[in-house]
């Protein structure tokens, strides 16, 4: 998220969908609505830090009115329509490297299985590592054109590392048909080449490279179900976004495009 305005005591941080308008910066702290599992999430973030991942906000505490306080991470965060600087190839590679750093630390932190972690974007196959699940441009902090931190871990849940890579690819390649991509992304992005850059930045194994396109398709299906659930629940933000972005026809088109280009993506990853 990025600051808007110059309030004396606080400023609204813009960006995102779920907490739009409800995230405030007060000096060195950010105050935002706390997720139901905030206590467990804060403990996990602190454990990640102890295991070497210092590229995330530091939890400070919870307020009496149900908000959380975390440290502010300075830097640049891109909002749609995304500018060219955040879609460069070095920027993309740095996102993959940052995600790898997260996973290396997360692998050493046991997941609290007693917690009801959010299932909206969770890996349907589960896992023993907590994935971020929402590494979109709005949740990555940049400095000097390189990704330096991840924010907004609200949707983190146990899953496979490859699942988190696939979810990240959806936003950063992006793994969208050209018509869908034009709404938020610069023209001329080479999706197969960018998928390989992200994978190389992360350091996928040859086996994982071959599996990635199918996991992206699986992740797209889960994202569609997540939107459908929000719309069915009467969430006006998601309902409006669905209507503005082309409705379910857009999701049908995206999913068909991924299937049609599976061999192209696989070749780009393996050759």
Image (tube, helix red, strand yellow):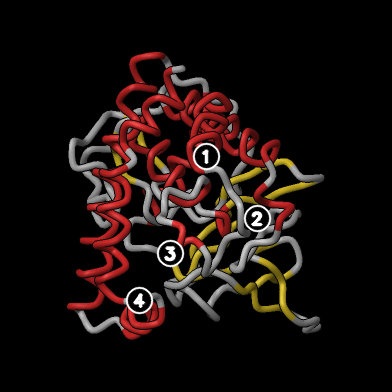
Point out residue 216 in the picture as x, y percentages from the top left corner.
33, 41
Report whether 123 appears left or right of 58: left
Tell me how many marks there are.
4
Instruction: Using the image as rendered, state which of residue 256 and residue 231 is in the foreground.
Output: 256
Residue density around tag 3, few if under 14, some if 14–19, many if 20 or more, within 10 Å: some
Disc 4 designates what residue?
246
Disc 1 designates what residue?
46
Disc 2 designates what residue?
71
Q: Residue at x 74, y 52 (%)?
A: 85
Q: Quadrant of residue 35?
A: bottom left
Circles 1 and 3, Cβ within 8 Å, touching? The answer is no
The residues bearing labels 1 and 3 have C-alpha atoms spaced at a distance of 38 Å
Residue density around tag 1, few if under 14, some if 14–19, many if 20 or more, within 10 Å: some
SS at mark 2 in the image = strand
The residues bearing labels 1 and 2 have C-alpha atoms spaced at a distance of 12 Å
Disc 3 designates what residue?
180
The residues bearing labels 3 and 4 have C-alpha atoms spaced at a distance of 8 Å
Q: Which comes before the other along the chain, label 1 or label 3?
A: 1
Report whether 95 appears left or right of 227: right
Q: Is residue 67 visible?
A: yes
């Amino acid at each position: 998220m990025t600051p808007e305005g110059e309030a004396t005591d606080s400023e609204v941080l813009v960006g995102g969908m779920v907490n739009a308008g409800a995230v405030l910066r007060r000096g060195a702290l950010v105050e935002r609505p706390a997720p139901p599992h905030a206590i467990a999430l804060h403990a996990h973030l602190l454990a990640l830090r102890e295991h070497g991942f210092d590229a995330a906000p530091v939890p400070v505490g919870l307020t009496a009115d149900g908000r959380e306080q975390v440290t502010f991470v300075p830097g640049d965060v891109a909002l749609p329509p995304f500018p060219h600087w955040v879609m460069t190839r070095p920027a993309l590679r740095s996102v993959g490297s940052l995600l790898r750093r997260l996973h290396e630390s997360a692998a050493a932190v046991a997941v609290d299985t007693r917690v009801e972690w959010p299932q909206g974007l969770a890996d349907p196959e589960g896992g023993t590592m907590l994935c971020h699940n929402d590494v979109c441009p709005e949740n990555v902090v940049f400095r000097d054109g390189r990704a330096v931190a991840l924010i907004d871990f609200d949707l983190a849940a146990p899953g496979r590392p490859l699942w988190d890579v696939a979810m990240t690819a959806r936003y950063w390649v992006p793994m969208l048909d050209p018509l869908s991509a034009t709404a938020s992304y610069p023209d001329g992005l080479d999706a197969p080449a960018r998928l390989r850059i992200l994978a190389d930045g992360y350091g996928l194994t040859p086996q994982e490279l071959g599996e990635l396109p199918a996991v992206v398709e699986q992740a797209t299906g889960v994202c569609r179900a997540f939107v459908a659930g929000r719309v069915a629940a009467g969430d006006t933000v998601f309902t409006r976004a669905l209507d503005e972005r082309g409705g379910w026809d857009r999701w049908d088109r995206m999913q068909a495009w991924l299937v049609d280009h599976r061999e192209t993506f696989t070749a780009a990853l393996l050759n």
